[in-house]
Image (cartoon, rainbow, N blue to C red):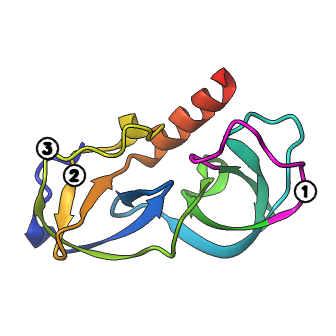
Amino acid sequence: MTAGIAAGDGPRFGVPVAGVPVLLPIGTLLEYVAEAAVFPLPRSPRRVIGLLQLRGMPVTVFDPASAFERPAPQLRREAVLVIGQGAEAGAVLVDAVPGQVDIAGDEPDARPAAACVFADALGSAIRDGAGRNWWPVDPRRLFELLAAEAVAA
């Protein structure tokens, strides 16, 4: 999926998700919402924390780091990254504001944390100019894994 990404490919955007620095694909519609109103869905799978309304469209919000126990359903304000648009959109809780990542080179032997529930959505690591590893993510696969894991839980 990510073969051939090199320093000459220029800046990309990245964001930590559940402690994993992910590199977002070029050309994917992204929208960061700092304090999204997330409406709970009672009895929803554990990785689905609720819905947000984005310009009149409901968007499912996933939490890849959610614990087995969930707090009582209530309106929450969360930092989310909406990926995609329309019926294809999904949102994921993020650990920080997305930022520009200057690619320095590949780091093919690096692996994300073993507890990463969405590791199968990640490509080979890429190193930034500061020596930090970032993993390119396939958003569609990310949401498929989170939805499937949520149902299986």
- Is tag 1's residue or tag 3's residue first in the polypeptide sequence? 1
Q: Which residues are magenta?
A: 63-76
Percent position of residue 17, x then y: 48, 57
Q: Dot 2 lies on which element? A: loop
Classed neighbour count for the residue bearing mark 3: other residues with Cα under 10 Å, few (<14), some (14–19), many (≥20)? few
Q: CA distance from mark 2 to mark 3?
A: 7 Å
Quadrant in the rendering for residue 10:
bottom left
- Is tag 1's residue or tag 2's residue first in the polypeptide sequence? 1
For the residue pair 25 and 65, the one nearer the viewer reads as 65
Q: Residue 109 shows which numbered tag?
A: 3
Q: CA distance from mark 1 to mark 3?
A: 42 Å
Percent position of residue 96, x then y: 51, 72
Classed neighbour count for the residue bearing mark 1: other residues with Cα under 10 Å, few (<14), some (14–19), many (≥20)? few
Q: Dot 3 lies on which element? A: loop
- Is tag 2's residue or tag 3's residue first in the polypeptide sequence? 3
Q: Residue 85 shows which numbered tag?
A: none
Residue at horizontal 48 percent and vertical 37 percent from the top: 117
Percent position of residue 6, x then y: 10, 62
Q: Residue 74 shows which numbered tag?
A: 1
Q: On the image, numbered disc 2 is attached to which residue? A: 125
In this view, 109 is above or below 99: above
Q: CA distance from mark 1 to mark 2?
A: 37 Å
Quadrant in the rendering for residue 149:
top right
Classed neighbour count for the residue bearing mark 2: other residues with Cα under 10 Å, few (<14), some (14–19), many (≥20)? many
Amino acid found under the numbered disc labelled 3: Asp
In this view, 118 is above or below 6: above
Amino acid found under the numbered disc labelled 1: Gln
